[in-house]
Image (cartoon, coloured by chain):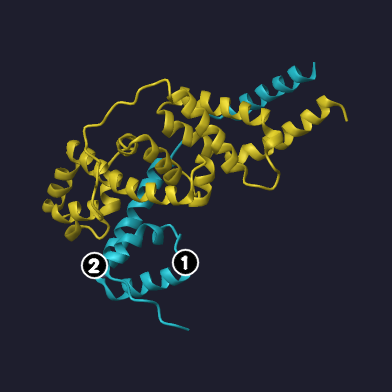
Chain colours: A cyan, B yellow
Amino acid sequence: MTAPSRYSCQEVVEKLDEYVDRALTSGEIASVEEHLQRCAECACEYRFESNLISEIRAKLRRIDLPPDLMSRISQMIREECDKEGE
Amino acid sequence: MSETDSKTADAAIFESLLTPQLGAAYGMALRLSGNTADAEDLVQEAALLAFRGFKTFELGTNFKAWFFRILTNAYFGKRRREKRRPTSVDLEDVPERYLFERTAEAGLHERSNDPASHLVSEMDVEQVTAAIDALPEEYRVVSMLYFLEDLSYQDIAEVLDIPVGTVRSRLHRGRRMLQKALWHIAEEAGIISKLKNEDAAS
Ligand SMILES: [Zn+2]
């Protein structure tokens, strides 16, 4: 197995979003992780970005679905079927 | 099987696919339109459009992405008639690590081991939504899909009918813009000074 290529802080900062989103290749992931192990500043920045996203998500996802919305949609679809059946 | 019977069978399949996605779809509609009445209208309109076009959906493919595409298009159709209000924050060329640097400068890193969550948890949903709303439309919609749903870049690309690379770059820039907008809103609302004082007092 070859050792991951060593990234600079700048390279890591640029790839951090995609690392958080698990959108990197396995080679890139290895390189980012190798850097995060030896650079406290980037590791701190990674935790910051990742926590920020989780917190925004948690906040925005608290939504109450109107309880009768699906039944209204079902009703609408039944009417649509009847209309076309005529 | 008569035409009505096959329609009814389609309706049953359609509803079984829609039901598990309805919460997500309504959430997206609510965050996009900003109020419950418009969100309900938007979801109902999208559901009817989707049912009418259900023949074009291939069973076994991603229903969620397919339905969200219809939903966002229905939203864009309505939205085109309205003018979006410009925001007071300049979101051009926001540097990397924007919020990290601002919170560090404000001394929030020494006092909290999770300053990002600490800051956002002090903001209410309306303030966080307002920050996303401050983004230019093409960044705003990508960001909404990103924050509200566990959609991959590929799924977001499919929903919006844009290349994956565009999703990637809009999300990257959009996140920097959002950080600046969040900071600006938190500052205006007195949250930053509250956090500083709170920390100094403890
Ligand atoms: Zn580093």
Q: Is residue A64 visible?
A: no
Residue beneath the point at 38% across and 38% down: B140
Q: Position of residue B32 (x, y in %)?
A: 43, 32
For disc 2, does the CB lie below 8 Å from ligand 1? Answer: yes
Q: Secondary structure at mark 2?
A: helix
* Badge 2 density bin: few <14, some 14–19, many ≥20, Cα 10 Å: few
Q: Is residue B80 visible?
A: yes
Q: Is residue B60 left or right of residue A55?
A: right
Residue beneath the point at 28% across and 70% down: A8
Q: Position of residue B63 (x, y in %)?
A: 62, 42
Q: Is residue B31 left or right of residue B158?
A: left
Q: Position of residue A43 (x, y in %)?
A: 29, 67
Residue beneath the point at 58% across and 37% down: B67
Q: Nearest to the eye among marks 2 and 1: give it.
A: 1
* B196, B141: nearer the viewer: B141
Picture quarter with the C terminus of chain B: bottom left
* Badge 1 density bin: few <14, some 14–19, many ≥20, Cα 10 Å: few
Does label 2 or label 1 sit earlier along the sequence? Answer: 1
Q: Is residue A14 left or right of residue B29?
A: left
**On the image, which quarter does residue B112 sit in?**
bottom left
Q: Is residue B139 left or right of residue B93?
A: right
Residue annotated with mark 1:
A25
Q: Residue A41 — which label?
A: 2
Q: Is residue B78 shown above or below A41?
A: above
Q: Is residue B153 shown above or below B79?
A: below
Asked if badge 2 and badge 1 are on a common chain, one would say yes
